[in-house]
Amino acid sequence: MTQKLNPETYAAVASRAECLATAADIDAALDRMAADLTARLAGQDPLVLCVMTGGTVVSGLLLPRLNFQLRLDYIHASRYQGATRGGELDWRHRPSEAIRGEHILVLDDILDEGITLDQIVRACYEDGAASVTTAVLVEKERPHACTADVVGICLPDRYLYGYGLDYKNYFRNAPGIYAVAEVDY
């Protein structure tokens, strides 16, 4: 479990961070993602799986842009648990029965190393998914263990926060996507 950031530390991290994508950039990315997903999934009645916790912001902003029939559930698998480096995958909720025979749309905040997304896709197929489409708001410019089908925006390989992405469990609500200063990482 990570410790809470005191207000002074929070303010210092925020003041040193660099904005890499504004709210307008993210809105445009979400619009592009919605158009792509609509072209891919309209008529399939997909079961959307929001990847907790980072995917909540992306899902909340993207779902109203999707103009087709869908259902919503969640999956909770994490390698970070508030840390700044990933560890072993921790499954907290895997809706195995709900997945069987379904067209699945996995929504997440970021494709960083790709390990978590790769394991989620594998789990969906193990649980009997008819198909799996993946969408992430941010893809880091680096090698990945897997690829996402739909990507909102590509950003440099730095520690990022905002729009669901966190820094030590904070800043998910930042009004843009920011790179943490090296001194804070």
Image (spheres, grey):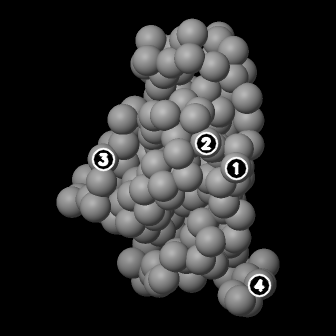
Circle 3 or circle 4, nearest the eye:
3
Mark 1 residue type: Glu
In this rendering, is residue 35 above or below 167? above
According to the image, label 1 marks what residue? 97
Identify the image quadrant of the C terminus: bottom left
Apparent side of residue 72 relative to residue 80 in the rendered image (left or right)? right
Pick the front one: 157 or 51: 51
According to the image, label 3 marks what residue? 147
Q: Residue at x 54, y 30 (%)?
A: 103
Asked whether residue 119 is in view, the answer is yes
Q: Earlier in the sequence, mark 1 or mark 3?
A: 1
Mark 3, secondary structure of its residue: loop
In this rendering, is residue 16 above or below 28? below
Circle 1 or circle 3, nearest the eye:
1
Mark 4 residue type: Lys
Asked whether residue 167 is in view, the answer is no
Circle 4 or circle 2, nearest the eye:
2
Q: CA distance from mark 4 to mark 2?
A: 39 Å
Corner quadrant of residue 100: top right
According to the image, label 4 marks what residue? 4
**x and y percent of residue 135 in the render?**
47, 38
According to the image, label 2 marks what residue? 100
